[in-house]
Amino acid sequence: MMSRIINRLIVFGFRLRHALRAGYYKGHGIHSPAVYEFVEKVLFGKANSGSIPEGLFTGNQAQVRKTFPDKYLKVLYRMVQFYQPAIVVDLNESACQVSNALSADINRITLYRLINKSLCVVPEMGLQNTNTALKRLVPDGISNSGFPLIPSADLVFLPCSNNPEKIISHLAFADSKVEKGFIVMEGIYRTNAMRKAWQKAVASQLVSIDLFELGIVLKGELLTPGHYRIRF
């Protein structure tokens, strides 16, 4: 009980610091073309300001929304719509609204989701059929040397975790698979393990975006280096 209270106070401190230090509202002062495009087109772009399609999010919505506000779900949804990644990997171990946001365009993308510690391809008919109509199963679990069926990925989502070994393993996997694209980390200040993993990601990558609830790493060629705390 006491450890939870202490962690909440720590998270509150990080939230306050982020609010005081964050800037670049609507792209002002950003010198990286890739980050400016992300802020202008995905976060605040008029073309993406509409609501998420009705019925997209199903399941235990109340539980998800406690830790993952709607506006961040919209960020994931808009990233898929704007950047149109061909291969998306969701390392959530259970279907939730995040999975639905990433699978919004399931007929065009290939979505892998973690089920029973194995990566599975989500069928074109959607997440509701994942457990009964898997196209193929990758049995090796999360490792840098596994996944022969996934030579690369365009977007990898890492859920929040308080297990240091798990999140470091997930981060290493994502880094090895994404050559040009995005690594998205949930709850980068919520647990000590996530805070350390985010610090490692920021230190090892050229471009990172801190939205507080989401940490986003951009990978690719000819990127202008920088770490951006964005008020969102």
Image (cartoon, grey):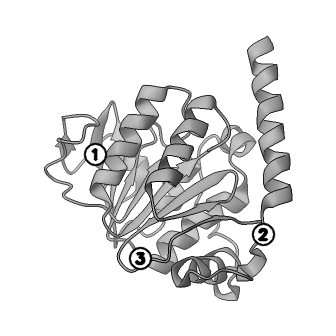
Is label 2 in contact with label 3 (beta carbons under 8 Å)?
no
Q: How many numbered discs sit on the rendered protein? A: 3
* Residue at numbered disc 1: 120
Q: Position of residue 8 (x, y in %)?
A: 79, 29
Question: Mark 2, mark 1: which one is toward the viewer?
Answer: 2
- Residue 23 marker: 2
Between the residue at mark 2 and the residue at mark 1, the CA separation in whole angstroms equals 39 Å
Q: Is residue 55 visible?
A: no
Whichever of labels 2 and 1 marks the residue nearer the N terminus, that label is 2
Residue at figure coordinates x 42%, y 27% from the top left:
165
Residue kind at label 1, given as amino acid type: Cys
Residue at the extreme left: 148
The type of residue carrying mark 2 is: Gly
The residue at 35%/77% (across/down) is 221
For badge 3, the amino acid type reads: Gln
- Residue closest to the eye, 65 or 180: 180
- Label 2, label 3: how many angstroms apart (C-alpha)? 27 Å
**Dividing the picture into quarters, in which one does residue 21 lie?**
bottom right
Residue that carries the numbered disc 3 in the rendered image:
84
User: 23 or 106: which is nearer to us?
Assistant: 23
- Separation (CA) of disc 1 from disc 3: 20 Å
Q: Comparing marks 2 and 3, which lies closer to the viewer?
A: 2
Question: Residue visible at 48% across and 66% down?
Answer: 104
* Image quarter of residue 43: bottom right
Residue 11 visible in the shown view: yes
